[in-house]
Image (cartoon, rainbow, N blue to C red):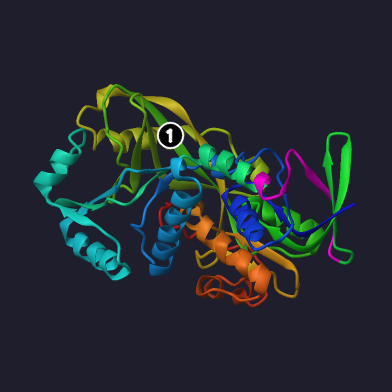
Amino acid sequence: MRAFDLVVVGGGISGVFTSYFALLRGMNVALVELGHLGSGSSGRSAGIHTEQLILPIDIELSRRSREIYQEVAPLGFFRTGFLSVEPSWMSSYSAQILKGAGTRFRVLSYDELRSYIEWALVRDDEVGILTPDDGVVNVPHVLETMRRRLLGLGAVIFENSTISYLSLGDGRITLTNGSCEETLSFSNLVLAAGAWNRSISERWLDYRPPVAIYACQLMLMKTSVELGATPVYFEDSHIYIRGVGKSFVLVGNGRVVRLDDPSKCPARPEPEYLLEMSEKLAQRLRHPEGYFPSGGWTGVCSSSADGMPIVGRLPGLENVYIVDALDGYGIMRAPALAQDLAAYVADGKASEALKTFDPSRFGGVCSEPDKIIELHSMP
């Protein structure tokens, strides 16, 4: 039986980077994934990475995460900028937030905005907020780069593996892969499986994270119109658009489908969602006849009762930690939170972010939130 200082459950961005930073701190790490690395929500992300967020703590995490991507997987981050189209009265508020956070930005006038996104219809009272350091994350490339880094640092990666036994009493976890079975011993355990954390912790740890689980939908459209590399967000309809190559665009608005079980997530967006997106896009595209729905996909997310992440040590358990409720912002938050969590596991010192996101803040209440609070979502 192999022994590990840390076993991380979940092979998405959170789990991979938690493993990486733990390895850098000299820990012996095993990473466990039900499918393959990135086969969950991370691999279904729109990949947009921006500092145009509401809360200063999120802006800081996004900036730190971008710096981490650029350092450890530089070819996985493309600096494209990010553009928010919003009413002129709102731009002063947005500019104030970004200025206070030290984010580089530029306000585009109506004429500048029209020139920047010639493919879109811009209203007379609208301006643009452009953050030039933002970009797009190529998640598959990042995860493959991190796989090589993890293996190079001595991590053991278990893919296509299910948990058939988990006990904190003797610090053991048994993994099953087909007909093969292996038991590992561990000193510390991190649950970084996103929406799947709940079923794992309920079954084996008698703990229910206070989260709601939902599917976030994305629509893919084929087009011959060149949109450019910069993702664009329209404040009035909460729609974001990202060009994917020269032939496709990815469209979303955070509209959610509540789920009882992440395994019940639909593979494709609802027909009603595709119709709604098409109708709203028709009001924004200069040549809507040049765009054709081409399907889409969904990803499973989780949200806490206050809309903030749940990251840190589980209440009452000395050696079990969790990363959950990243609320669709995992690409922007996870690397920085993983860095903080690995430090916390190693030396017991919680960063300011982890103090804010401590699971104990709910006071032992483990019921599912009535409402999904997500800054880019619609009910």
Nearer-the-camera pick, 50 or 268: 50
Magenta segment boundaries in residue numbering: 151-168
Give the percent coordinates (x, y) of residue 281.
30, 36
Q: Quadrant of residue 96?
A: bottom left
| Image position of 27 (left or right of 186) | left
Residue 209 horizontal/vertical position (percent): 66, 63
Above or below residue 3? Residue 293 is above
SS of the residue at dot 1? strand
Provide the residue designation for mark 1. 219
272 lies left or right of 237: right
Query: For the point 43% across and 52% down, which residue is it?
Result: 377
| Relative image position of residue 135 (x, y in whole percent) | 36, 46
Amino acid, disc 1: Met
Give the residue displayed 71% in from the left and 61% down from the top: 27
Quadrant of residue 343 within the rendered picture = bottom right
Residue 46, can we see it?
Answer: no
Query: Magenta stretch containing residue 153, yes or no?
Result: yes
User: Does residue 72 belong to the magenta stretch?
Assistant: no
Q: Residues within 10 Å of mark 1 (few under 14, many from 20)?
A: many
Residue 336 position (above or below residue 13): below
134 displayed left or right of 327: left
